[in-house]
Each structure stands twice: as C-alpha cells, then as structure tokens.
Amino acid sequence: MWIKVLDGQLVQATYFIRAEVITVDVKARKRLPYQIEPDGIVVYPGQDHLEAERTLAELGIPFNTEVLAHDKAHIEKAKGIKYASRSEAMKHLQDNEEPESQVIQNLKKSLQEKEVELAEIKSVLKAKGFMK
C-alpha cells in the first residue's frame, strides 16, 4: 500500500512505475524527485508521472507504468480523520489502531457525557436534600 499523509490527510498513490531505479547513481536519481522503492517509483496526485517516464527513458532505464486503484475501504475509513504521520495512518488502516486525533475526540466526548451525568446526579442529590 502506497500512501502518504499531506496536511493530516491520507493521500493514496496514483501510479507505480516499475523500474530498477535503485541501481541508478545518486546524481541521476536527483532527476527523479519521487518516492523511490526497491522495485520502482511511487507517484502521488499532483506529481507528473509522464515526466518520470520521460526521465527514465532519457536515462535508458526500462519501465512499466501501472495505474493504481484506490482502496475504497481505506478511503472510507480515513474520511474526516487527521493523521499525525504516515505510520499512524498505516497502523489505523492495517491494524485498526485508533489515530491520536480520534482518541482525543473520543476522550472529549466521554468527558462531556460524564459532566452531564454528574450534573444529573447532583440535581437528584439536591432534590433529596443530600446536597445544598
């Protein structure tokens, strides 16, 4: 799964260009400002996959471009959630670990519910004369 977090939002890769980029020298690699993986290049929305293909062709590196399908379950699961990091997003999507932003939101909700419950208890105790 190729994802990144941009301004707290989950972004899924749109293309994967299979190529042996890992063997390319450092100077040539600087011409590929993308996420480099052992078996190719990950391209995200807003990045130009055609430019990456042109650069690979100029470098004489054979490649095969795959259009990636977005995982609808992940899109739904991540909807409205702000992630602190890619690791946090991965843990949430793969391991169902609750993201920090959700933990804080759930704690605030729980606190509000407990405050309402406490107010109701105090009201009952006052009505029965146990509190002033």
Image (tube, helix red, strand yellow):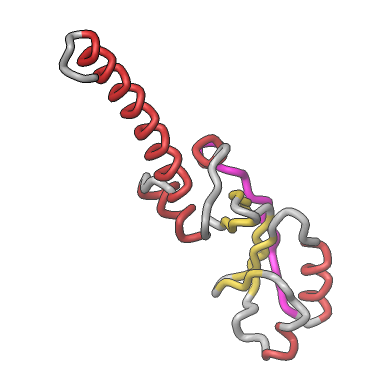
Above or below, comparing residue 2 to residue 120 in the picture: below
Left or right: where 4 falls relative to 77: right
Residue 63 part of the magenta segment: yes
Q: In which quarter of the image is residue 47?
A: bottom right
Q: What range is drawn magenta here?
A: 61-73
Above or below, comparing residue 9 to residue 125 in the picture: below
Above or below, comparing residue 117 to residue 23 in the picture: above
Left or right: where 37 falls relative to 53: left
**Residue 4 coordinates in the image, percent (x, y):** 59, 58
Residue 20 part of the magenta segment: no
Taking the spot 72% from the left edge, 78% from the top edge, the residue there is 61
**Residue 21 coordinates in the image, percent (x, y):** 65, 78
Taking the spot 40% from the left edge, 49% from the top edge, the residue there is 94
**Residue 28 coordinates in the image, percent (x, y):** 74, 86
Circle count: 0
Front residue (pair 34, 23): 34
Front residue (pair 21, 112): 112
Taking the spot 40% from the left edge, 44% from the top edge, the residue there is 103
Q: Of all residues shown, which one is farthest toward the top? A: 127
Q: In which quarter of the image is residue 27?
A: bottom right
**Residue 119 coordinates in the image, percent (x, y):** 32, 21
Left or right: where 109 falls relative to 75: left
Q: Quadrant of the C terminus?
A: top left
Front residue (pair 107, 67): 107
